[in-house]
């Protein structure tokens, strides 16, 4: 299956082009802000959770009213020196209160580079979040780059047979 481009583009703040939020942020350091997980800068910045929420933290995107997406793949890019998480769920919601688990990862050890995670999703959601449930053993967890993609599978068309009677 093939996937379309990153739905988030290049996030340049917590509100442009989409609203980004998180359960917590490590300190008051600008380079750890939630939108940094979606800035696709490759390595220099990332979202970092608060140490007190390392085992129960999330970062979320709001695509906005009337702009729901049918995400079926996300990619995590990790670079050396960033603390990661060992378990998480990727979730969708249309009301920001009731979350549907779309993908679950347990006992993961993220490696440096890009790791894609694909799943079947038949519903468009306004909100998506990655919810980390187990930290990697460090003081806090970081997420350098997260991209989201819709399936771009080609639709098959059934042939039409036309017959003419003489």
Image: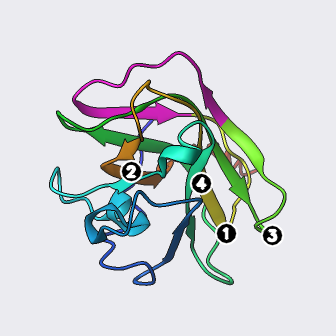
In the drawing, what numbered circle is on residue 146? Answer: 2
Q: Is residue 46 above or below residue 9?
A: above
Look at the picture and state if 135 lies above or below 39.
above
Whether residue 95 is in magenta: the answer is: no
Q: Determine the secondary structure under disc 4.
A: strand
Give neighbour class at mark 4: few <14, some 14-19, many 20+ (Cα, 10 Å). Answer: many
Q: Tag 2, which secondary structure?
A: strand
Between disc 3 and disc 2, whose residue precedes? 3
Residue designated by label 1? 126
Asked if marks 2 and 4 touch (Cβ < 8 Å), the reply is no
Disc 3 on helix, strand or loop? loop
Residue at the image point whose x is 17% and y is 33% from the top:
80
Mark 3 touches mark 4? (CB < 8 Å): no
Q: CA distance from mark 2 to mark 4?
A: 10 Å
Q: Which residues are magenta?
A: 103-118
> Quick one: label 2 or label 1, which is nearer the N terminus?
1
């Amino acid at each position: 299956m093939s996937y379309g481009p990153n739905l988030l583009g290049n996030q340049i703040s917590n509100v442009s082009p989409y609203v980004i939020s998180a359960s917590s942020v490590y300190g008051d350091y600008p380079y750890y802000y939630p939108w940094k997980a979606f800035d696709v800068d490759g390595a220099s910045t990332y979202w970092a959770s608060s140490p007190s929420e390392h085992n129960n933290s999330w970062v979320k995107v709001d695509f906005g009213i009337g702009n729901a997406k049918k995400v079926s793949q996300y990619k995590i890019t990790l670079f050396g020196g960033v603390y990661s998480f060992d378990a998480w769920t990727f979730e969708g919601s249309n009301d920001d209160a009731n979350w549907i688990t779309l993908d679950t990862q347990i006992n993961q050890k993220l490696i440096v580079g890009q790791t894609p995670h694909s799943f079947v999703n038949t519903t468009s959601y306004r909100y998506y979040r990655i919810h980390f449930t187990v930290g990697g053993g460090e003081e806090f967890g970081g997420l350098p780059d997260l991209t989201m993609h819709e399936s771009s599978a080609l639709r098959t068309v059934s042939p039409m047979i036309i017959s003419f009677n003489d």
